[in-house]
Image: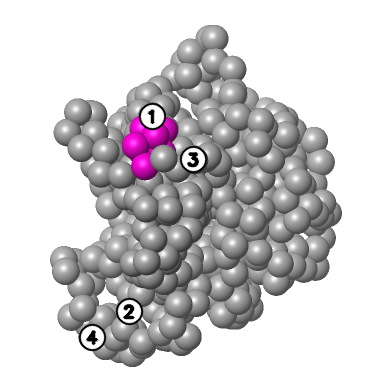
Amino acid sequence: MNSYTRLFILYLLTFCCSIAYAQKEDLALKHIDANTTAYAEAAMQIWNFAELGYQEYKSSALLQKTLKEAGFTITTGVAGMPTAFIAEYGSGKPVIGILGEYDALPGLSQAVVPEEKPIEAGEPGHGCGHHLFGVGSAAAAIAVAEWLTKTKTTGTIRYYGTPAEEGGGGKTYMVKAGMFDDVDAVLHWHPSNNNSANASSSLANKSAKFRFYGTSAHAAGAPWFGRSALDGVESMNYMVNMMREHIPVESRIHYVITEGGKAPNVVPAFAEVFYYCRHPDMDMVKQNFEWIVKAAEGAAMGTQTRMEYEVIHGLYNVKPNETLSKVMNRNLNLIGGYEYNDEERAFAEKLQETLIAPSNLANTNAVMPYRVEEDGIGGSTDVGDVSWVVPTAGMRAATWVPGTSGHSWQAVAAGGTSIGTKGMIVAAKTMALTAIDLYKDPSIIKAAKEELLRRRGPDFKYTPLTGDREPPLDYRN
């Protein structure tokens, strides 16, 4: 056999292996296609459950059942959280984690119609699309599990069922418990109004409930006997609002008064305000939060009330990983977006009439240009804590009508339609292909780990912003 013949045979074998791998990857995508209806139904079940953080018992159970039926081993109630779980398939390294969320938001009940119409006023709704997040991630994990089996590839796919992302910080307790210590890479996604896979950060965030205790009295007959806890809250808020002038412009501070008294003619003996304090840099969050505490202490002194506060959650800013994000972006471009059918387009056009800044409906069929965003903007997420201990990459999929803001009734409405599930399938396929790339090419994981070490510095040690507190299982009560 001459050298040309050997080269030709080597080329042919390489080509055939590439075709075989491609076919196997197609099988992973075909699994998702074949089960799209089932995954859409599961997502809608969780949409209807609309359970708040740490109360997602039915949602968590449904996801566990779905993964268990696909052959995953389930560990429930992890890290002291009854609705948290881990589902695992395969064995050995590498270990690839996929994150899933499933909590709803308070006060966002909404019917599947393009005008504001609560199903039950004041009740929760999936305004951040976590019903899609949880199921889409499960679909990706199951597709990868099938690929591992059919290709006889060594490795572990691990689904993290993470409760209470909306203010409860479930993932931070998993990180604290060491549940990501053996993971090589983590993938996640989030519902959005476009398709993108950027190497982007987020805002670090620390929250607390400030509780003021005063003395009740008749507000007309003997107000001098009373000390108003509500005065304490309002004095605190006034000082914090003056504080805004003197902190970095990137800071974000917002609050809601959760308790302010029961009747105008009774001096309130108890009042509570719930604060979020954010900034792209965790150190600045700590500084601003300490100032907020000083304002609360001063307010208590000035109103002769007593104040105590409870830290509810604390989140790191996301540490972007370009190595993984480029792989995710490549696969998102390979999968692409989706087109509306006539019914979806009619719904979207009607809903856009209610938006402040509607965008081109064609955005659902496009992928946004890849960007690197070192400084956090927008919201916060407990994915941030995960991203500091293991290389992490995420993407967004167009599950909402372009121009829709998260945490809105419009997001709830679109998320309850096939618009939402089409975006979910885009995310599931993209994450499945990305995980498969990591199993096939360990050098990607090696480079991603080196990038994480470089970005966070050699002396990094994870310390949760929540301190030693246990999960705030009752924070939504």
The residue identified by callout 2 is 340
Q: Position of residue 458 (x, y in %)?
A: 53, 9
Q: Which residue type carries mark 1?
A: Lys
Give me the residue at 80% from left, 54% from top.
76
Q: Which residue type carries mark 4?
A: Lys
Gap between marks 2 and 4 measured at Cα: 14 Å
Rendered image quadrant of residue 177: top right
Q: Are marks 2 and 4 in contact (CB under 8 Å)?
A: no
Q: Is residue 299 magenta?
A: yes
Residue 270 in sight: yes
Q: Mark 2 or mark 3, which is nearer to you?
A: 3
Q: Which residue type carries mark 3?
A: Met
The residue identified by callout 3 is 307
Crowdedness near tag 3: few (<14), some (14–19) or many (≥20) residues, C-alpha within 10 Å: many
- Say whether disc 4 or disc 3 marks the residue closer to the N-terminus: 3
Q: Mark 1 or mark 3, which is nearer to you?
A: 3
Question: Above or below — where is 61 with respect to 158?
Answer: below
The residue identified by callout 4 is 350
